[in-house]
Amino acid sequence: MSKKITLSNINNFITGSTRQALDQVGIIAPHVKEQVKYRLATCHEDCVPKGACRNCGCTLPGRAFSTPSCDPSRFPDLMTEEDWNNYKQEHEIN
């Protein structure tokens, strides 16, 4: 993910911001909320304290709500509920 203004980056920003707002009013799908928490927990030592992603520079927590992963070596794209449940089992995530 680059810091350039592109249609993809604009879409990611809008999607992430919308999901974050929905989360604040309690109407986000539980499997999405779990994945966001997982992403933030994965990045708790470097990105979260800075308030920005080390890889793409986007602000947190908003970036954690967008669908594509900015660092697939750390966590995957946001998944469907079924895929997320399978991923949790495969990777022993509680």
Image (tube, rainbow, N blue to C red):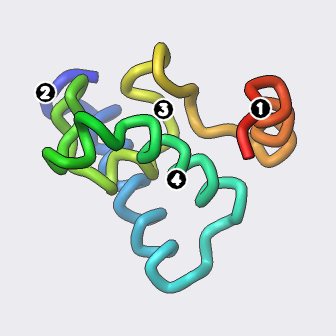
Residue 26 image position (x, y, % from top left): 57, 82
Q: First in sequence: mark 1 or mark 4?
A: 4
Residue 85 image position (x, y, % from top left): 83, 41
| Residue at mark 1 | 92
Residue type at the position of mark 1:
Glu
Q: Is residue 23 above or below residue 3?
A: below
Residue type at the position of mark 4:
Lys
Q: First in sequence: mark 2 or mark 1?
A: 2
Quadrant in the rendering for residue 88: top right
Q: Is residue 23 above or below residue 47?
A: below
For marks 2 and 4, give the CA distance: 26 Å
Q: Are marks 3 and 1 in contact (CB under 8 Å)?
A: no
Mark 3 or 1: in front is 1
Q: Are marks 3 and 2 in contact (CB under 8 Å)?
A: no
Residue type at the position of mark 2:
Lys
Q: Residue at x 14, y 45 (%)?
A: 50
Q: Residue at x 70, y 64 (%)?
A: 30
For marks 4 and 3, give the CA distance: 15 Å
Q: Secondary structure at mark 2?
A: loop
Q: First in sequence: mark 2 or mark 4?
A: 2
The 10 Å Cα crowd at callout 2, few under 14, some 14 to 19, many 20 or more, is: few
Q: First in sequence: mark 3 or mark 2?
A: 2
| Residue at mark 2 | 4
Q: Is residue 31 left or right of residue 71?
A: right
